Amino acid sequence: MKAAIIEKKTFPREVLCGEFLSGEVVSAIKEFGLYDEFLSLHPNKVTHFRFIPENGVETSHALGFEAYALKRSRLDQLLLNAAKDSGTVVFQPAEVISIQPNQDIYKIRYKTPNDDLFLFTDTVIAAYGKQNTLDKSLNRAFASNRSGYNGVKYHINNILLNETAGNEIQLFTANGIYCGMNSVSENETTLCFLSDRNVNQQDPKNALDVLLQRNRKFRSLFACDPLTELRKLPIYGTGNIYFGRRAAVENGIFMIGDAAAVIAPLAGDGIGMAIESGKLIATILTEAKKYKSNKHTIEEFYAAGWKRLFSKRLSIALHLQQVAMNSFGGNMSGQLLKFFPQLAGILIKRTRNVKSFT
Ligand SMILES: Cc1cc2nc3c(=O)[nH]c(=O)nc-3n(C[C@H](O)[C@H](O)[C@H](O)COP(=O)(O)OP(=O)(O)OC[C@H]3O[C@@H](n4cnc5c(N)ncnc54)[C@H](O)[C@@H]3O)c2cc1C
């Protein structure tokens, strides 16, 4: 099949993300034949997950799968280059402005810096992320939702920290906020947090202040005044992230990745789900071509396959997020993990594709 990607940004670009690459991502990288090239980017190997709630009762747990941390700019460039090398046509920078179905053909309007153009196709796969003006123009039910959940990412130089995360993904929690921390290169750490404006009433940029005040271990990480230093850095963020249900197929358009559903970030599984859902639709379309299936059958297959793969982990991750973003829940979880460390392994498994476990 002939494929084209229309991408708004010039790569390499950053996106809001904790930059933890789970077992699902590593399996896909191997399957795509990109493992050696990936390792040549020197990703940081992550072997453990550390949970650090407000009361400081911290625990560390083996992940049970091969995982890494790497800047999204580098991972996404690797994947886009591989798509080009396999014959995919890439229009970039080019922003999709509208997608109009007209009987069996879609008319896609997109803009480049110099032109306003159209592309016609019989199949559209929407991979435009968690939030987009296209959601409104496609009349998606959640498009006007204002959840109050805001995400922010910084890359911070390690000289500003007293200690780095090393081979751990570390999760610090406090009321209405949690922050993931990863070493993404020899001298840089990713700090990525999700805050709930309904709880702490803070502007997203200042929400970290709540974590600094309430989580002593988080505060002691910094060898500087964190708020002053972070204000000098580029900020990658999104407001009002919607974690609720979305349709996997809308107007015959196949939604993948965050466009299909956003998993609670504490599961560290969003990139894996984006790749897995892409693989799912690719497999279904390939089979459908062989058996000459009609569009309706393809849509039903994709919606059912998507539900089977992702529904359960989405809802478990959302519940875990609700517990972690609450003072009492976070502290209780810390105690439970201390006395029943095997619980961590069970919960980690429940939020992902078990095939990725070693
Ligand atoms: C706070 C937070 C922390 C997270 N941490 C992690 C983590 O550590 N590990 C993990 O696995 N997941 C994490 N995630 C989730 C992960 O970032 C996403 O699930 C993943 O990036 C989804 O990939 P995607 O391809 O669907 O969307 P994106 O990565 O958002 O990519 C969408 C692409 O579409 C392009 N685009 C958008 N609109 C248009 C348009 N109109 N025309 C053309 N192009 C367009 C964008 O430029 C972008 O390149 C986190 C999420 C949040 C909110």
Image (cartoon, rainbow, N blue to C red):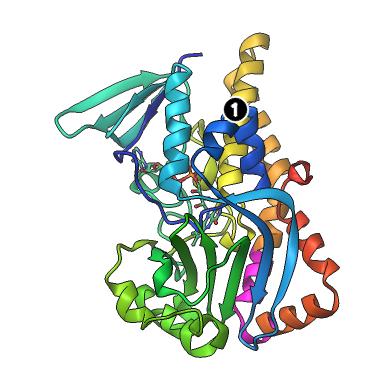
In the image, is the residue at mark 1 within 8 Å of ligand 1 by its beta carbon? Answer: no
- Amino acid type indicated by mark 1: Phe
| x and y, in percent, of residue 353 in the image | 73, 45
Question: SS at mark 1?
Answer: loop
| Picture residue at 60% right of the left edge, 50% below the top | 68
Please give left or right for residue 184 compared with residue 354 in the image: left
| x and y, in percent, of residue 89 in the image | 38, 20
Report the predominant secondary structure element of the magenta stretch: helix
116 is higher (above) or lower (below) than 104: below
Question: In which quadrant is the C terminus drawn?
Answer: top right
| Picture residue at 60% right of the left edge, 29% below the top | 281
133 is higher (above) or lower (below) than 207: above
Residue 139 in view: no
Identify residue for label 1.
32
Answer few, some or many: residues within 10 Å of disc 1's Cα (few below 14, many 20 plus, some between 14 and 19): few
**Segment tinted magenta in the rendering:** 318-329
Farthest left residue? 114
| x and y, in percent, of residue 152 in the image | 41, 65
| Picture residue at 43% right of the left edge, 31% below the top | 80
Residue 308 belongs to magenta span: no
- Tally of marks: 1
| x and y, in percent, of residue 42 in the image | 52, 45
Residue 332 in view: yes
Looking at this view, is 239 or 298 the one in front? 239
Please give left or right for residue 70 compared with residue 102 in the image: right
Looking at this view, is 322 or 236 the one in front? 236
User: Residue 235 occupies which quadrant of the picture?
Assistant: bottom left
294 is higher (above) or lower (below) than 154: above
Residue 326 belongs to magenta span: yes
Looking at this view, is 68 or 94 the one in front? 68
